[in-house]
Amino acid sequence: MGLKFHLFLQCFVTFSLLYVHGNRTIGAVFDDGGFLLEAAFTLAVATASDGQENPFVANVVRTSPDDLLEAEEAMCSILETNVFGIFGPKSKSNIGSIQSIADYLDIPHITIEPMETQNRNWSVVNLYPNHFAYSQVFLDIIEMKGWTEFTVIYEGAELLSFLDNILTMQDLDSGEHILMRVVQLPDGDDYRIQLKNVKASGSVNYIVYCRKETLPQFLEQAQQVGIMSDDHSYIIMNPDFQTIDIEPYKHGGSNITGIRFFDPTLEEIQNYVVSLNEKVEELSEGQITNAIADNAITLDLVLLYDAVILYTTALNAMGLEEPANVTCESVDSWSLGSSIINYIKAMEINGLTGVVKFDEEGFRSDFEVDIIEVQAHGLEKVGSWNAEDGYVNTRIVIPPAEAEGSDSMKGKHFIVLTALSAPYGMLKESSNKLEGNNRYEGFGIELIEELAKMNEFNYTFDIQADGVYGSLDSKTKKWTGMIEKIMDGRADFAITDLTITSSRQKAVDFTSPFMNLGITILYKKPTKQPPNLFSFISPFSMEVWKSLGGTFVGVSVLLFILGRIAPDEWQNPYPCIEEPETLDNQFTLANSFWFTLGSVLTQGSEIAPIAVSTRMAGSMWWFFTLIMVSSYTANLAAFLTVESKFYAIKSVADLSNNPYEINYGAKKGGATFSFFKDSDNIIYQKMFKYMDEHPEYQTATNDEGLERVKSEDENYAFLMESTSIEYMVERNCDVAQVGGLLDSKGYGIAMKKNSPYRQPMSESILQLQEEGKLTRMKDKWWREKRGGGACTDDDAGSGESQPLVLANVGGVFILLAVGSALALVCAIFEMVIDVWLISRKHKVPFKEELIAELKFILSFSGDVKPVRHPEKSSSCSGGSKKEENGDDMESNKEADANRDRAPTPRSERSTHSHHTLHSRRQSNAVQMAKMRKFSRV
Ligand code: GLU
């Protein structure tokens, strides 16, 4: 009811205007439900009337959208007012309804809507660019970008005609095959399922055509789904792309390209916006102020302005004063209608949307647009397109150095791929349920946190579940694991114990290394050797012992010979006899050996060399023994205190020779395995062959390698990187690093080839290194957290002296026991021989004599032994005949025998048997008798 009354009122007003002389009425039907189009229309009409003798008057009727009947009524009511032409409406169905009347009555109908079909015979002029030319713009952009793969995402079937050129696109000029997918967005406002499918398809380039109202939602959901990273590119076909809020997408890294028909910052546009806002305020009677925000003016408002200017310019140019005098009831059409349409299609004006002109078919296919791109500071014009030249690149190429500024990562969001490999990335131990990045901790996790702080970026961790870091599959020629994901753009960065290798460097970029390491061996700790009873032999090698023995014999014999040669060694045995008949020599063979043995055992002997030659030989021997004994003592201390260990392997060379048949392997597909594979060193090649032939010894993770090394059931060595070994030996006290490093390399953060983030990330890593933060972080994750330092005391004291246990020195006891036993045997043997000699000499039974001797020995009564068979001749008081005759020969022999015994070492002397003492006393008596004889003479 209200609407009917409103229509009536409007007709009344305009009907009265008809009688105002010289006014030219232009009708318009708007169904947008707002004041914007009406404001634009009336403003344009007012502008067109400026300075005109016969001003234009706007006759606007507002209707509901998609109401054919209402639109028809509105059209008819406008025709009652004798108009020159009709503008609007917006909805497709209403346009169709009005167009059919306009076409029938030949009333020029000017529209600004994207229409799929236009019949050139119809009395319609559409300022919206022709769909064919429109799609050509995007085709040229796609070709310029060189996309060989993309997905067309469109909203409604009515927009399909604007994709004409794209959907029928052939392969690129360069000969590259084009892979195109087409996805239609569903009704409603949730496109996530479709977007996830697009993501799953692996497509990274998208050309999107949807309504301006849908676009923000679409972009937001694309970001949520994770297709808004550096690797994703968008071309937005909606001409109002520049009016949406691009703030959330400025730093995401995606390349987003669009077009615009005008630059909103131009002065005439700005002025137009100001006037429009005033007009809306006026039409809404102050209800709506500032209807159009800064730079948010849409194409339809500008096109409508251009359309009014174009049409009024044509009317002025044609000098038309007479309006169409037709109504909906008329049978005849307006005779001038077609002339106006034809005139317009042949003319050209400079509007707010650039040059407005039509092709022979009557379509606006010759237009110019700006190509714009989302950049960190906002939208930037990067090119232009016109029908004649196609895409013209006007992008200002910023030198890479400037482009990679320190804030190039600011505000962006990255997917950071990591693996659960201690201590680089680990699951946090917590009783609470953790979510997101909070679930992880470790050296790599903390490093990313630091880098994110420094470069102000956001990140989400993604876990490489299978723990495969990446290697080039020689058969498929494809990369695997984390490297593959980085190359595919499924992750932006990869951080873990990821080694920088030359082959990986060809596929991805690495930052400067954040840790240095080399390959080495993880193996069980060397086993302790049980103490050696005879470790007192160890200070000298067998060779030295043998040489020592040889020298001892040699020098002893030499002394014996020298003693015989040197005249001074022949001494008067009885100094009181001035002219002795015989001379004595102390260096008998036995004494020579005794002398050398005494000095080598640092006990000395009572034998003292007299001649220069024997003294010289003796002193050299003493010097030799001094050095030997000191060396022995010094070395003995070390051998007794240092624990000896058994090393099954000491280096890779041992592993390659493998005398103990140790199984060994490395991480499957890891940098260590590749090192052996690519090496031309013979030892490493041999080891690679072994590992290649025994895939069962390759492990999926370092932890598996550790478990196999520790296992009691297996004799296994694991080739591994030194930093990881360092971490493990801190916590597993039964394993150790064996041997040195085979190479020198580093861990880095991987990212896509030619990534602009390599520079800022590397700079930040170097800064962390210089500040000592990386070292502190390493100490924290290696030595403090998660059971670090458990084995630090394990080897303590290995350098300090340990108390010697019996097992260390037991051999000496054994030697003493054996020596003592031998001495006892000797003593018994001597005693038996002596008893036997006495029994023979005195003709007494051996057994009797032996029992008597044993009785005496076992009685342990004092140190005086009675002589059981005294010899008469030995009496000191009464000289015998034999003695009187000077039985020199016999007495001399006995004296000689006694002298041989005389130089017995002190120690031995004290242990002389009574029998020996007895003999000595006898010999002394002989000597005294001799002296008496000489004095008588
Ligand atoms: N860091 C190695 C890599 O990046 C994994 C461990 C290894 O091979 O020892 O592949």
Image (cartoon, rainbow, N blue to C red):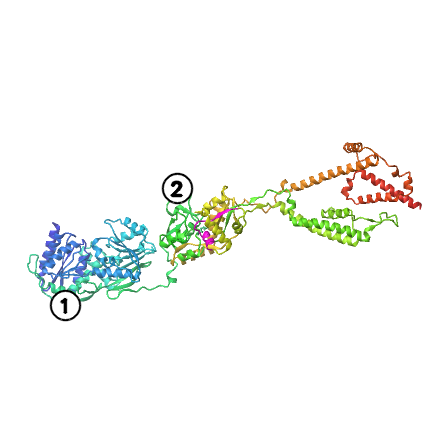
Front-lying residue, 638 or 71: 638
Residue at 93% x, 45% y: name it. Answer: 936
* Label located before the other in sequence (2 or 1): 1
Query: For the residue marked with disc 1, what is the amino acid?
Result: Ala
| View extreme (right): residue | 937
Q: Is residue 414 magenta?
A: no
Is residue 886 something that shows in the picture? yes
Please provide the residue range marked out in magenta: 661-678
Q: Secondary structure at mark 2?
A: loop
Separation (CA) of disc 2 from disc 1: 80 Å
Residue 31 x, y percent position in the rendering: 16, 54
Residue 118 x, y percent position in the rendering: 16, 59
Residue at 27% x, 51% y: name it. Answer: 217
Residue identifier under label 2: 432
Position of residue 805 relative to residue 507, above or below, is above
Residue at 16% x, 52% y: name it. Answer: 66
Residue identifier under label 1: 317
Q: Quadrant of residue 835?
A: top right
Q: Is residue 675 magenta?
A: yes
